Image (spheres, rainbow, N blue to C red):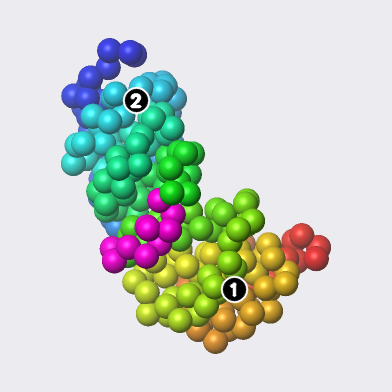
Amino acid sequence: MAETTVAEVLAELAELADPRTRAVNERHGDDHGVNLTKLRALAKRLKTQQDLACQLWKTDDTAAKLLATLICRPTAFTRDELDTMIRQARTPKVHDWLVNYVVKKNPHAEELRLPWSTDPDPAVAAAGWSLTTERVTKKPEGLDLPALLDIIETQMKAAPDRLQWAMNHCLAEIGIDHPQHRPRALAIGERLEVLKDYPTSPGCTSPFAPVWIAEMVRRRGE
């Protein structure tokens, strides 16, 4: 598969596209019709191909961009390349996969975290907050958690949807992983009521921070 061309991949993605899948995805803001299980199977067959990934990313095809995040070499991108890419990731799934499968595995992630968190583009800011949440859960040393809670308390309520969701995730993880800050995290969640009425499927945990925190703490037996 080493000689696979962009045209061949786009043709295969077009064959995999299904109108019903596209209709479901469009309800979530994603403009493609490829089943993600089939997309992952294609990525597994192609294996890592950095040059092909870069070419696929440059297309206007959302499924191709998703595939690019799966077959790229995350550590190969420069800081400036990642900054450009996050600004090109306009659909929720592309944004999510780029942050989680590429940026978080790149050595420039921490360097990008702070400037992204305060970027005027809410989608870029959301990426910065996702990186901050990663630090909260895996490497909190050096983070000023009270200062993060201050920002969340003053800005989350009025933040655009994607940024609000990322800040809420950070709030929940602070409450879950850091017991000394749990009372304040719970109080902020209760007062702001962000995502309190978010529809949640049976068996799933509500994204409303106080419920989310309480459930995860319960599961840990704390």
Q: Quadrant of residue 62?
A: top left
Identify which residue, 32 or 24, lies in the foreground: 32
Name the residue carrying label 2.
50
Examine the structure image and report whether residue 114 is included in the region drawn in magenta.
yes
Amino acid type, residue under disc 2 in the picture:
Gln
Q: Looking at the image, which residue sits at the far front?
A: 142
Tell me the chief SS of the magenta region.
Answer: helix
Q: Earlier in the sequence, mark 2 or mark 1?
A: 2
Crowding around mark 2 (Cα neighbors within 10 Å: few <14, some 14 to 19, many 20+) is: some
- Residue at image location 58% in from the left, 61% down from the top: 143
Give SS at disc 2.
helix
Classify 51 as above or below 2.
below
- Residue at image location 54% in from the left, 64% down from the top: 170
Name the residue carrying label 1.
146
Q: Which residues are magenta?
A: 112-121
Amino acid type, residue under disc 1 in the picture:
Pro
- Residue at image location 45% in from the left, 61% down from the top: 129
Residue 61 position in % (x across, y down):
22, 40
Crowding around mark 1 (Cα neighbors within 10 Å: few <14, some 14 to 19, many 20+) is: few
Residue 162 position in % (x across, y down):
37, 64
